[in-house]
Image (cartoon, rainbow, N blue to C red):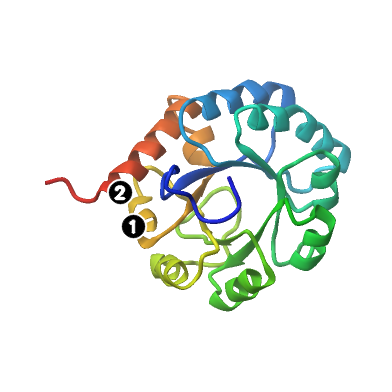
Amino acid sequence: MAKGKPTQAEPACRLYLVTPPALEPAAFAPILAEALDAGDVACVQLRLKDCPEDDIRRACDVLRPVAQEREVAFILNDHPRLARETGCDGVHVGQTDTPYRDARKIMGNDAIVGVTCHDSRHLAMIAGEEGADYVAFGAFFPTATKTAEYKAEPDLLSWWSELMEVPCVAIGGITAENCAPLVTAGADFLAVVNAVWGHPQGPGAGVRALNAAIEAALAGPAG
């Protein structure tokens, strides 16, 4: 995930993988490698909630090289100081986490800092104006990964993409079967969890299915 909108050499919409809520780093490393080797992935976010910092640090040390060796950005959720100390490419902060400005000061100008904006145009405008590298909207669909307090609609993506150059990430229950309206509405990235890690044929098949669905949506109706 480079800073800014995808370039002409990149797809108009790309995958943003979020890790399962619980994992054992050494066991998960080959699973992550399988996913990243299966097709285009812009970013991996390590998201371990309610986890001791030492465990997060260990997970970063094991999993970050898997992503970075494949030129995939590795982003840590919630912890800017840990992200900087462990060599992550960036950090993702929510509305109740470290404020964007503090996260930017900790990470520096070259790092990626993304911000959760739920279904709020106001929060997204603030994040974009302050300099966030991307804003994340959702949840667009029901999800078993976390309790979704907000419901976003595709027209939010259309509004944002027409108004702002800052990329937007769509999140929440996204699958290969339901992602087309988000792609055509203007999502720059699709954040997915279960559609990859829970795919019945494995994570590689999940990545391939999602990339095929993105390509089909961008191509438009057949005929």
- Please tell me which residue is depicted at 51% across the width and 54% down the height of the picture: 172
Crowding near the residue tagged with mark 1, few <14, some 14–19, many ≥20 C-alpha atoms within 10 Å: some
Image position of 143 with respect to 186: above or below: above
* Between 100 and 192, the one nearer to me in the picture: 100
Position in image of residue 174 (x %, y %)? 45, 49
In this image, 117 relative to 190: left or right? right
- Please tell me which residue is depicted at 77% across the width and 35% down the height of the picture: 60
Quadrant where the N terminus sits is top right
- Please tell me which residue is depicted at 61% across the width and 69% down the height of the picture: 128
- Type of amino acid under label 1: Thr
Image position of 116 with respect to 204: above or below: below
**Label 1 sits on residue:** 184
* Between 118 and 222, the one nearer to me in the picture: 222
In this image, 9 relative to 87: left or right? left
- Type of amino acid under label 2: Ala
Q: How many marks?
A: 2
Question: Which element is circle 1 on?
Answer: helix
Could you tell me if the residues under marks 2 and 1 are in contact, i.e. CB atoms within 8 Å? yes
Considering only order in the chain, which callout, 1 or 2, is on the residue closer to the N terminus? 1
Crowding near the residue tagged with mark 2, few <14, some 14–19, many ≥20 C-alpha atoms within 10 Å: some
Question: What is the spatial separation of the Cα atoms under label 2 and label 1, in whole angstroms?
Answer: 6 Å
Position in image of residue 147 (x %, y %)? 60, 57
Question: Which element is circle 2 on?
Answer: helix
- The extreme front residue here reads 8
**Label 2 sits on residue:** 217
Position in image of residue 24 (x %, y %)? 73, 28
- Image quarter of residue 74: top right
Residue 210: which disc? none
